[in-house]
Image (cartoon, grey):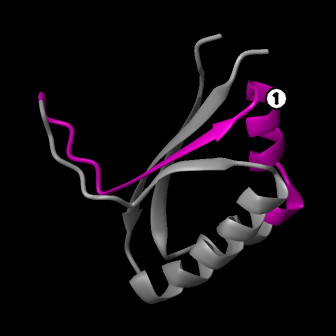
Amino acid sequence: MMSAYIIANVEVTNPTQYEEYKKWSSEAMKAHGAEVCVRGGKVEVLEGDWHPQRLVLLKFPSVEAAKKFNDSPEYGKARASRQGAAIMRMIVVEGVA
């Protein structure tokens, strides 16, 4: 089975409200077995003009597992709490076998 990663670039617009999202998203990650690889660490641009605000990298056993997390009621609760607190850009990408 091929692993998969969810990569998110988050532009936080309301830091106080975003803390609520972090709480619920952490619960969803635990419920769906996400391996948290990166969550808001310091970013240094090495090449190009990409300047992400807050990066998150989650590892899942498969694309299907990543999509199940994204579509779950647990993450839905987190997503609802994020409304008005952040602009989310998120992708899922296949890992190497």
Nearer to us in this view, 26 or 51: 26
> Quadrant of the image for the N terminus?
top right
For the point 78% across and 47% down, the residue is 69
For label 1, the residue is: 64
Q: Is residue 92 above or below residue 53?
A: above
In this rendering, the answer to whether 24 lies above or below 64 is below
* Residue 49 among magenta residues: yes
Answer left or right for 90 relative to 3: left
Left or right, residue 72 beside residue 14: right
Q: Quadrant of the C terminus?
A: top right
Q: Quadrant of residue 60?
A: top right
Question: Which residue shows up at 76% across the image and 26% down it?
Answer: 62
- Secondary structure beneath dot 1 equals helix
Most extreme residue toward the bottom is 16
Q: Position of residue 79 (x, y in %)?
A: 67, 65
Position of residue 26 in the picture relative to residue 10 (left or right): right
Could you say where residue 47 lies in the image, as x and y percent from the top left?
12, 28
Residue 43 is situated, as x and y percent measured from the top left of the image, at 23, 51
Which stretch appears magenta?
47-74
Residue drawn at point x = 85 percent, y = 53 percent: 72
Q: Residue at x 58, y 13 (%)?
A: 96
Q: What x and y, as percent, mark residue 68?
A: 84, 41
**Observer-nearest of 54 and 81:** 54
Residue type at tag 1:
Glu
Q: Quadrant of residue 5?
A: top right
Residue 86 highlighted magenta (yes or no) = no
- In the image as oriented, which residue stretches furthest toward the right? 73
Q: Nearer the viewer, residue 77 or 34?
A: 34
